[in-house]
Amino acid sequence: MAFGKEVALSEHDGNPVPPPGGRLKPATSTLAFLEHHDGVIQKGSLGVLARALAVGGDVSGVVVGYNVADVAASAGAYGVSTVYVVDAPEFEAPLPQPRVDALEAVVAASGASNILFAASVLSADIAAGLSARLDAGLNWDVTDFAIEGGELTARRPALGDTVLVTVGWTSAVRIALVRSGAFEAVETGGTASVHPVPVTLKEFSTAAQMVEQAREQASGPSIEDADVIVAGGRGLGAPEGFKLAEELAAALGGAVAATRAVVDAGWYPYSTQVGQTGKSVTPKLYIALGISGAIQHKVGMQNSGAIVAINKDPNAPIFDFADFGVVGDLNQVAPKLAELVRAHKG
């Protein structure tokens, strides 16, 4: 595959804004979309940013919203020195189409050739729209990426997550949607230079209006943000069995997750599903209660810091990759473990 060394500024409504220094960036120029909610950049976006900085090249961030100058500046603590910001009332609602216009303008302003998104409902919509707008290739479900000889390559699972394949791009601009939880955010300290980019929205981009935004009411951290996750599988026996996971998670200050079989059975919400068709998580501690450890679940949690498996079946596949294993009745082990944690905390 051959990739161009530079990307020409694209035409869009309004005049293209020259990048700092007035020149195009090299083919290894990477732009990370920093999704934020309630004034906080999402952990997944910061993880993608951390990986991009580790890979090397010229890496910048982009923040789109309203009154988000402070949000953009906060990205400097995670090692990025340049953040482009599109700040206007039209971007207050988390709608994808206006953000496609914004990203088109930022790509033109920065000369970026690689645009990276952490997977989410919003970013998937933006990435797809931007791909069509820029005639850019889009690879999704990416679990890792690298720049080799000035070319972006990526790895993604295939055949039911049983193999990893290397993928590339044939377009001048390359877009990647990175699997949620694939990388950890790394706070390095520092400051970022914020560069405003003006955008003229296309008429059709303002056709949709958000009339209501519902928020899930939940106590404790989400599974994407939690340092400790207690996950339950079919071995819990019934929906009521999740009380064991909830009590242990509460004692540890963590979140509760579930396998696909469990959420398909209606035992626990889909938002907590970990695995191939759910979310990928990277907590410091992952406790699996009654989970066999099928490959589809493994790919969603295998990058956890420490994995503890509790299962009565000594031949359960999860013991093959768990750091610590307890063969026993989880109905006895889990409550005792929660009791010990509470006692230790005093």
Image (cartoon, rainbow, N blue to C red):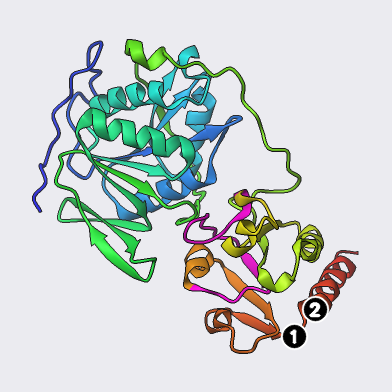
Using residue 188 as the reference point, say whether residue 197 is left or right of it: left
- At label 2, the amino acid type is Val
Using residue 18 as the reference point, say whether residue 156 is left or right of it: right
Residue at image position (83%, 69%) is 338
Direction front: furthest residue = 265
Q: Which residue is mark 2?
A: 333
Query: Which one is in front, 260 or 117?
Result: 260
Q: Is residue 191 visible?
A: no
Residue at image position (35%, 54%) is 142
- State which quadrant residue 216 falls in: top right
What main secondary structure does the magenta stretch of the protein show?
loop
Range of residues picked out in magenta: 271-294
Q: Which residue is mark 1?
A: 328
Query: In this picture, is 207 found above or below 30?
Result: above
- At label 1, the amino acid type is Gly
Indicate yes or no whether the magenta region holds residue 276: yes
- Asked if labels 1 and 2 touch by Cβ distance under 8 angstroms, the answer is yes
Q: Could you tell me residue 226's position as x and y percent?
A: 64, 54
Indicate the secondary structure of the residue bearing disc 1.
loop
Indicate yes or no whether the magenta region holds residue 260: no
Query: Which one is in front, 242 or 288?
Result: 242
Residue at image position (21%, 45%) is 28
